[in-house]
Amino acid sequence: CVLVYAVSGAFCANFYLRSNNSWNTDGAWTDSDGNPLTGVPGEDDNVYILDGVTCTIPSSIVCSALTLNGILDFSSGTSITTKKAFTNNSSLTASDSKVLTLNVEGIQNNGTLLMEGNLSSIHVSRAILNSSDSSHAKFGNVYVDFSSNTDEVFTFMGGEGIFQSIAFENGPFSGKTFDLQSGKIQNLDLSSFNNSTVNLKGNETLIIDNFRMADAAGS
């Protein structure tokens, strides 16, 4: 017989995708031991796309945390929102009109993450955008959202990633410290950082083509 676990959205569960399927396919998901689960991941659940598996995003999806070891097919979807973290160990490619929203920890990119379309954007509250190879990390518009960020210091590590633009939204920004350590940024807008400190540390490769500031104190 086959034991099927019913999962309610009232608590956090771990969903594993072990074969090519759509995110919204009931019965496609299992627990960590391979036991089938009913339903699909909800906004409080942790999701794992396993190695060699392609998950198709049919529209807009929300989960707590997403770990990608396989391939995320974002061609038909419009937005992916994680409430905690997104860890990319494999491949995600998005073009025009795609939105990736990451809250709390932000992105850890160890694979290929391409968000190159003119309308593609990434919204993060605590950004960790790492990549060792610029050809494997290209971003459109990155918006740092401070609505859920109470930290006084915001650290940005872009690695070898290439960013079309970085801007900030949903302040207040006064009294903040922004540590910019690495990345290749075409347009950096710090005009909203009034009475704040901006540290351009450049511990690694740091290239900024266009830079806009208000009365932030730079160092």
Image: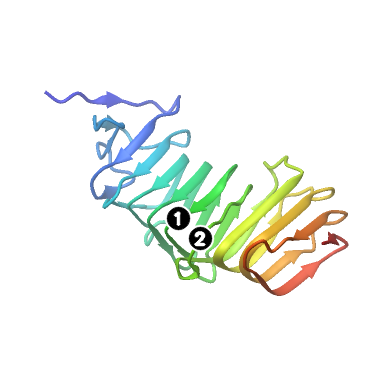
Q: Where is the C terminus found, in terms of image quarters? A: bottom right
State the residue at coordinates (59%, 54%).
Answer: 123
Indicate the secondary structure of the residue bearing disc 2.
loop
**Left or right, 204 with reference to 91:** right
Q: Is residue 142 above or below residue 170?
A: below
Q: Is residue 140 above or below residue 170?
A: below
The answer to whether mark 2 and mark 1 are in CB contact below 8 A is: yes
State the residue at coordinates (24%, 33%).
Answer: 34
Q: Nearer the viewer, residue 195 or 2?
A: 195
Q: Where is the N terminus found, in terms of image quarters? A: top left
**Left or right, 79 with reference to 205:** left
Q: How many marks?
A: 2
Q: Amino acid at mark 2?
A: Ser
Identify the mark at residue 131; answer none if there is no mark. Answer: 2
In this view, the residue farthest toward the front is: 203
Measured from the top left, where is residue 187 in percent x and y? 67, 71
Identify the mark at residue 110; answer none if there is no mark. Answer: 1
State the residue at coordinates (73%, 40%).
Answer: 150
Measured from the top left, where is residue 23 in percent x and y? 33, 46
Mark toward the start of the polypeptide (2 vs 1): 1
Q: Is residue 42 above or below residue 51?
A: above
Identify the mark at residue 162; answer none if there is no mark. Answer: none
Residue 36 in which image quadrant: top left
Measure the alpha-carbon separation of dots 2 and 1: 6 Å
Q: Amino acid at mark 1?
A: Asn
Measured from the top left, where is residue 18 in percent x and y? 25, 43
State the residue at coordinates (46%, 70%).
Answer: 135
Measured from the top left, where is residue 170 in percent x and y? 72, 50
In this view, the residue farthest toward the left is: 1
In this view, the residue farthest toward the bottom is: 209
Q: Is residue 22 above or below residue 120?
A: above
